[in-house]
């Protein structure tokens, strides 16, 4: 029975590949997608990288910003993931971290910030809505100004209560 399960169970590599290439938001809500991504990632993917992939999946579903083709986004993610695996191997092989390895890790961390930018290279000239252009420019700055997220329920409730009070008056 164990041999049968082992034969048909997905390997760690297959799970990571599915995480990087196949998993989509589709009709799932974001928390369901994140849960599925965490399940596939296991211990093979660090949290920062997983968070970046998750946000990229959400951004791909935001229609107002022209984005790169999916295959280009996936190749960019794969390349960054391979770099992370190499850094991880180097770190495990060396008991003391060298200055060069620390610099490579810092460079990788900086590239992680740029991994977020999946907008089409001509996005600013294609986009027509001023606020969308400002948002994209803010996202490309250090510290990433602006957020794409779900509705703030507390603010929404406050707003609804204020509207109800106004309508009673």
Image (tube, helix red, strand yellow):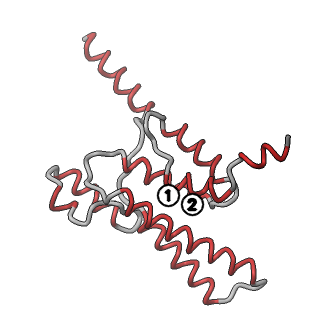
**For this view, does 22 lie left or right of residue 144?**
right
- Residue 9 as seen in the image, left or right of residue 86: right
The picture places residue 96, in percent across and down from the top left corner, at 75, 85
The one nearer the camera, 18 or 88, is 18
Q: Quick one: quadrant of the C terminus?
A: top left
Residue 168: give x, y in percent of width and height: 27, 10
- Find residue 156 and report its image quarter: top left
- Residue at 55% x, 44% y: name it: 34
The secondary structure type at the circle numbered 2 is helix
* Spot occupied by residue 18 in the image (x, y as percentages of width and height): 56, 52
**Residue 5, placed above or below residue 42:** above
Q: Classify 10 Å Cα crowding around label 1: few (below 14), some (14-19), many (20 and above).
A: some
Residue annotated with mark 2: 48
Q: Which mark is residue 154?
A: none
Quarter occupied by residue 61: top left
Quadrant assignment for the N terminus: top right
Q: CA distance from mark 2 to mark 1?
A: 6 Å
Whether the residues at callouts 2 and 1 have beta carbons within 8 Å, the answer is: yes
Q: Which residue does the image show at 45% across and 31% down from the upper left?
A: 154
Which residue is identified by label 1?
52
User: What's the residue at 71%, 46% (across, down)?
Assistant: 8
């Amino acid at each position: 029975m164990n041999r049968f399960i082992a034969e048909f169970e997905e390997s760690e590599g297959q799970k990571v590949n599915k995480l990087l290439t196949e998993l989509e938001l589709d009709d799932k809500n974001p928390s369901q997608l994140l849960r599925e991504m965490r399940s596939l990632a296991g211990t093979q993917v660090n949290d920062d990288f997983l968070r970046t992939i998750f946000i990229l999946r959400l951004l791909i579903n935001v229609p107002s910003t022209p984005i790169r083709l999916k295959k280009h986004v996936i190749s960019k993610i794969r390349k960054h993931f391979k770099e992370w695996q190499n850094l991880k191997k180097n770190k495990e092989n060396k008991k003391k971290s060298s200055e060069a390895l620390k610099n490579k890790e810092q460079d990788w961390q900086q590239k992680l910030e740029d991994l977020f930018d999946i907008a089409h290279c001509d996005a600013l000239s294609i986009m027509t809505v001023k606020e969308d252009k400002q948002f994209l420019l803010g996202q490309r700055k250090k510290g990433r100004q602006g957020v794409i997220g779900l509705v703030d329920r507390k603010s929404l409730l406050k707003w609804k209560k204020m509207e109800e009070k106004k309508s009673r008056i």
